[in-house]
Image (cartoon, helix red, strand yellow):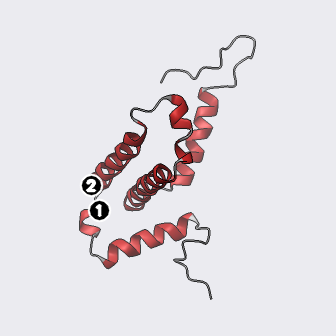
């Protein structure tokens, strides 16, 4: 029998969501996991990820995973961002994969493939 918490096995989104919920429940953190608190924590973690890249040149930022220490920091912050996003979605009942699919569908209509003869290829301003 395999350990469902084995970090070496690929994880699926529902399993990760359950693990996060179990982790918080075991520590009685649910009262603190309000939408307001979770979105604030998400913003903080995203800022910590951004901080790693803050003063890097574009070339340096593209190679950030080449340095093991920096790569470890990046992956830790990515994990933190994803954890808080998944917990936020859980509290509000948002299916993040469905939300993303719907957003991509809307963007495909909003930003059609440009005519290669008339476009620079630069992304539009929001």
Placement of 19 over or under 86, stated as above or below: below
Q: Residue at x 35, y 46 (%)?
A: 48
20 sits to left or right of 26: right
Q: Position of residue 75 (x, y in %)?
A: 48, 54
Q: Which residue is mark 1?
A: 33
Q: Quadrant of residue 82?
A: bottom left
Q: Residue at x 45, y 72 (%)?
A: 19
Q: Quadrant of residue 103?
A: top right
Q: Secondary structure at mark 1?
A: loop
**Who is closer to the viewer here, 122 or 96?**
122
> In this figure, what is the number of numbered marks?
2
Callout 2 touching callout 1 (CB < 8 Å): yes
Which class describes the residues within 10 Å of circle 2: few (<14), some (14-19), or many (20+)?
few
68 sits to left or right of 27: right
Q: Secondary structure at mark 2?
A: helix
Disc 2 and disc 1: Cα gap in Å?
A: 6 Å
Q: Which residue is mark 2?
A: 37
Placement of 100 over or under 92, stated as above or below: above
**Residue farthest to the top?**
118
Q: Position of residue 125 (x, y in %)?
A: 50, 21
Placement of 92 over or under 67, stated as above or below: below
**Residue farthest to the bottom?**
1
Q: Position of residue 101 (x, y in %)?
A: 60, 46
Q: Residue at x 62, y 89 (%)?
A: 1
**Residue farthest to the left?**
31
Q: Residue at x 65, y 14 (%)?
A: 120
Q: Quadrant of residue 8?
A: bottom right
**Who is closer to the viewer here, 28 or 54?**
54
Q: Which mark is residue 96?
A: none
Which class describes the residues within 10 Å of circle 1: few (<14), some (14-19), or many (20+)?
some
40 sits to left or right of 11: left
């Amino acid at each position: 029998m395999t350990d469902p918490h084995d970090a070496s096995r690929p994880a699926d989104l529902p399993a990760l969501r359950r693990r996060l919920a179990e982790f918080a429940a075991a520590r009685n953190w649910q009262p603190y996991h309000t939408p307001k608190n979770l979105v604030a924590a998400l913003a903080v973690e995203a800022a910590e990820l951004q901080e790693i890249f803050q003063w890097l040149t574009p070339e340096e930022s593209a190679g950030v995973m080449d340095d093991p220490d920096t790569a470890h920091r990046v992956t830790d912050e990515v994990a933190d961002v994803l954890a808080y996003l998944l917990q936020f979605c859980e509290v509000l009942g948002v299916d993040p994969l469905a939300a993303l699919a719907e957003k991509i569908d809307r963007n495909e209509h909003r930003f059609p493939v440009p005519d290669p003869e008339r476009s620079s290829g630069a992304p539009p301003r929001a």
